[in-house]
Image: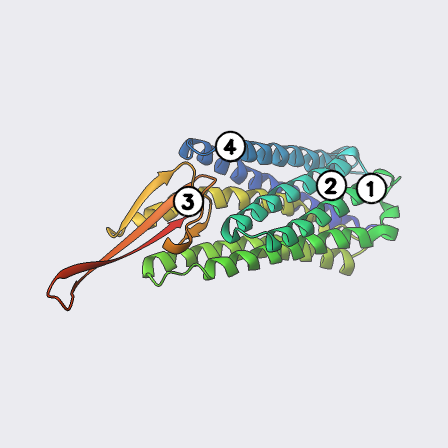
Amino acid sequence: MSIDVNPTLGAMHIGVSSAGFLFGLTTAQAVYYYTHYQRDPWYFKLLVGWTVFLDLFHQICIEHNGYMYEIVNWDNPLALLEAWWSLRAGVFTLGLITFTVQSFYVWRIWQLSKGYYFPAFVSLLALATFCTTMYWFKVVLGLKNLSEIVGVQYLQTTVNALAGGTDIVIALCMVWYLRHRRTGFEKTDGILGRLMVLCVNTGALTSITAIWVIISSSVWPQTQIYILFYYFLARFYSNSLLATLNIRNAIRRAGESNPSYELGYVSTGGLFQVAHPATTQSASGGGVVVQIERTVGRDDKRGGIGDDQESVNTTV
């Protein structure tokens, strides 16, 4: 197997630099989270810390990988076939990041549905992705050099197809449950609409990136152009999780702009959980409660005056 040096090194350089920029966004989002959501449950804080740690280690791996290829062995094209420890460790770390973020989304689906069938199905997809990634990691550990990767390229394709497919299923489930929580109130439905857009965007971003890894590795097998998109995956996953947690303040402010909304922090509220009066659900995480009360005066047949009240609670 021969490798075209110029597009490979160019893609690698762009990938490492862009991933470093995205890691800066990860860090900024983490700082914002810890300073603005201090009353969140401890497990949310631990989740953010764990995600940032994995993202940092993954960035170290790809920086070392780029350093070995571009600096140490700049005059040795055959070094592009070397499988450095950082390349192997990066595969393992990306698998952990993907599984962590997808597990968080499974929890969100369970919070919305309060059922077990869809969350169980999605969790099986996430687990299958993780197990396949770990098997791919085991195969990469046994490679003497990257020329042997051609024979097992189908494994990398399978990993990315599973990851992208799982992200699409997660986004569809979230949109499905959010659509069925519409209340008929313009502001509440507007908030739910923004949440649906967020779900679609985060799912589409990681799915499209995984698809591009598959396409680029298949169309340009003599290069490592796919590594440009591969480096992006970890950053997109971690930033999507942090953006999901940090968007709650923006949603709170959107509700506060209307005086008919009563907003407050609830330390035990679930993320993206919507409760109707007849089906109030218990909460289990940090969130924002949007409470809408409508009072309508009426005359009954006996000449009395009564009030009809309608209440809708939305926790995001």
Q: Mark 1 points at which residue?
A: 140
Q: Mark 4 or mark 2, which is nearer the start of the sequence?
A: 4
Residue 197 visible = yes
Instruction: Specify the amino acid type for callout 4.
Output: Lys
Between 280 and 109, the one lying in front of the other is: 280
Q: Mark 2 or mark 3, which is nearer the start of the sequence?
A: 2
Q: Name the residue under label 2.
A: 91
Q: Looking at the rendering, which quadrant does residue 286 occupy? A: top left
Residue 45 shows which numbered tag? 4
Q: Distance between the residues labelled 4 and 1?
A: 33 Å
Query: Residue at (38%, 44%) from the top-left corner?
Result: 288
Please tell me whether mark 4 or mark 1 is closer to you in this view: 4
Secondary structure under the numbered disc 2 in the rendered image: helix
User: Are the residues at dot 3 and dot 4 in contact (C-beta closer than 8 Å)?
Assistant: no
Please tell me whether mark 2 or mark 4 is closer to you in this view: 4
User: Are the residues at dot 2 and dot 1 in contact (C-beta closer than 8 Å)?
Assistant: yes
Q: Distance between the residues labelled 2 and 1?
A: 8 Å
Q: How far apart are marks 2 and 4 (CA)?
A: 25 Å
Whether residue 49 is situated above or below residue 164 in the rendered picture: above
Residue 119 spot, x, y in % from top left: 60, 51
Secondary structure under the numbered disc 3 in the rendered image: helix
Q: Name the residue under label 3.
A: 248
Q: Distance between the residues labelled 1 and 3?
A: 40 Å
User: Are the residues at dot 2 and dot 4 in contact (C-beta closer than 8 Å)?
Assistant: no
Between 275 and 89, the one lying in front of the other is: 275
Instruction: Specify the amino acid type for callout 1.
Output: Val
Residue 58 spot, x, y in % from top left: 66, 36
In the picture, measured across the screen, residue 255 lies left or right of residue 162, that is left
Residue 133 spot, x, y in % from top left: 75, 45
Instruction: Specify the amino acid type for callout 3.
Output: Arg
Q: Mark 3 or mark 1, which is nearer the start of the sequence?
A: 1
